[in-house]
Amino acid sequence: MGDKLKEITTFTGCFIAGTLIRVQRNLDLPHIMWKQIEDIQIGDLVLSRPEDGTDIQEYKPVVNTFKLDKKPVWVLRTLELVADFINNPTLSSEIIATANHSFWVCGIASIAGELNSLVLTQGRWSRLDQLNNGDVVQSNNKYFVVLHATQLYQTEEAHIAWALDPEGDGYGSAFDLNTIRETGRINGKFAYNSYHSENEQGESEYIPYLADVYNFEVEDYHTYYVGTRSFWVHNTNCGAFTNPNDQVP
């Protein structure tokens, strides 16, 4: 991000390097519509939408870019809602960000992935670490049900992190942060992961995975779309922003 990259002391929500951002197509490169977040520059045009949920999508300029060093990160796992999941199943999608990054929540649904289970609610912004199983987050044109949001922990490999299963002590999934994809299962307490410490009570604790993270500010609408699934997110850790006069888009 060049000389204009800002190191910020006020902790805002951010994404890891490699996270794709939906940008305006370059006329010279008409098939390129994504840019990695660490390469976003001031003046880039990113797809955005008014933060109150108004159903308008426009490309807006980036006015600031930010980087934070070595922050704990979480993984959000979702499943696209489709009309006939049994005969047309979709794979889960992952996005990795800090716990306080805000996603647009617009309903609830079954984690079985059936679109007809979707119940729309008034839209609101929610921190990643406050997303619950069954919450529905929105992309630019689809709905995704949250399977779980979980903190990532260290392993012996610098680019590999792992997350506990919501119901399992010591069982979970490993993630490659270079590709932002699950790489396998972890079975058994501390299996695949010798990185743990003891707290004051002598109990073992996993060590949070720390990563350099990035964010940017968008003019006017203050939102953008991330990942190949185009999840709609806010450009700050704005908390639970809602507008009671606006209905779910």
Image (spheres, grey):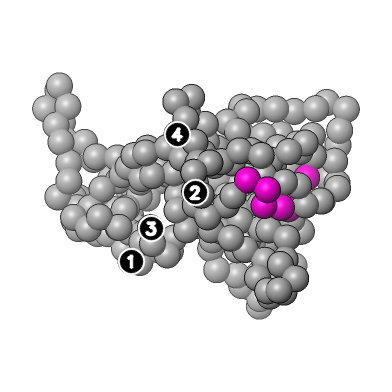
Q: Is residue 11 left or right of residue 103?
A: left
In magenta, the rendered stretch is 42-49
Nearer to the camera, 11 or 102: 11
In this view, the mark in front (2 or 4): 2
Between the residue at mark 3 and the residue at mark 4, the CA separation in whole angstroms equals 22 Å
SS category of the residue bearing label 3: loop
Q: Can residue 187 be spotted in the picture?
A: yes
Crowding around mark 4 (Cα neighbors within 10 Å: few <14, some 14 to 19, many 20+) is: few
Task: Classify the position of the C terminus by image quarter.
Answer: top right
**Kind of residue indicated by mark 2:** Gly
SS category of the residue bearing label 2: helix
Residue at 38% in and 58% down: 177
Find residue 29 and name its label.
none
**Kind of residue indicated by mark 1:** Gly
What residue would you read off at disc 4? 7
Say whether marks 3 and 4 touch (CB < 8 Å). no
Find residue 184 and name its label.
1
Across and down, in percent, residue 206 comes to 23, 40
Between the residue at mark 2 and the residue at mark 1, the CA separation in whole angstroms equals 36 Å
Q: Is residue 98 left or right of residue 173?
A: right
83 falls in the magenta region:
no
Between the residue at mark 1 and the residue at mark 3, the CA separation in whole angstroms equals 13 Å
Say whether marks 3 and 2 touch (CB < 8 Å). no
